[in-house]
Amino acid sequence: QVQLVESGGGLVQAGGSLRLSCAASERTFSSYGMGWFRQAPGKEREFVAGISWSGARTNYADSVKGRFTISRDNAKNTAYLQMNSLKPEDTAVYYCAASRLSGGAEVWSGNYDYWGQGTQVTVSS
């Protein structure tokens, strides 16, 4: 069982930046693909970014390409989401997730096996 704990959320003005962290309990963290999803009020959870076990492969939602960067530090069992040029429409609860499908940067939420509890990101206009 992998436990994931997100941190780094908060309130920021439009145009600002935040870095989310996802700390994993599992020492075999490097064997999992990682992803970030978000859910805004009244909307379905949507894919934001994914990264393979080595970090060599990444995927991004079109809405965040060029603004967000996913990365990981396997020595620290931690994944990150650097969010720049934030917009009010980025406001959501952000979740990190781990996938046993380590080779790809999975887009579909059904390919993820473990989820964190979420961290709130609020972008004011």
Image (tube, rainbow, N blue to C red):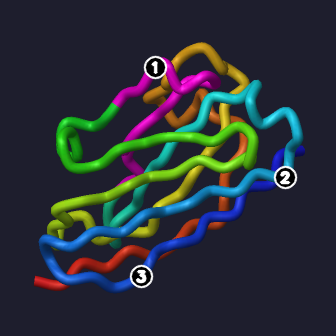
Residue shown at the point (67%, 31%) measured from the top left: 99
Q: Amino acid at mark 1?
A: Arg
Crowd rating for badge 1 (residues with CA inside 10 Å; few <14, some 14–19, many 20+) = some
User: Would you say residue 95 sits in the magenta stretch?
Assistant: no
Q: Quadrant of the C terminus?
A: bottom left
Total label count?
3
Read off the residue under disc 1: 57
- Residue 101 in the image: state x and y as whole percent: 66, 19
Residue 10 is labelled as 3
Residue 25 is labelled as 2
- Residue 33 in the image: state x and y as whole percent: 62, 29
- Residue 91 in the image: state x and y as whole percent: 29, 71
Left or right: where 3 falls relative to 10: right
Crowd rating for badge 2 (residues with CA inside 10 Å; few <14, some 14–19, many 20+) = some
Residue shown at the point (31%, 58%) measured from the top left: 83
Q: Amino acid at mark 3?
A: Gly
Q: CA distance from mark 1 to mark 3?
A: 28 Å
Q: Quadrant of the N terminus?
A: top right
- Contact, mark 1 vs mark 3 (Cβ under 8 Å): no
**Who comes first in sequence, dot 1 or dot 3?**
3
Extent of the magenta region: 44-59
**Who comes first in sequence, dot 2 or dot 1?**
2
Residue shown at the point (41%, 56%) measured from the top left: 38
Task: State the residue in front, 48 or 78.
Answer: 78
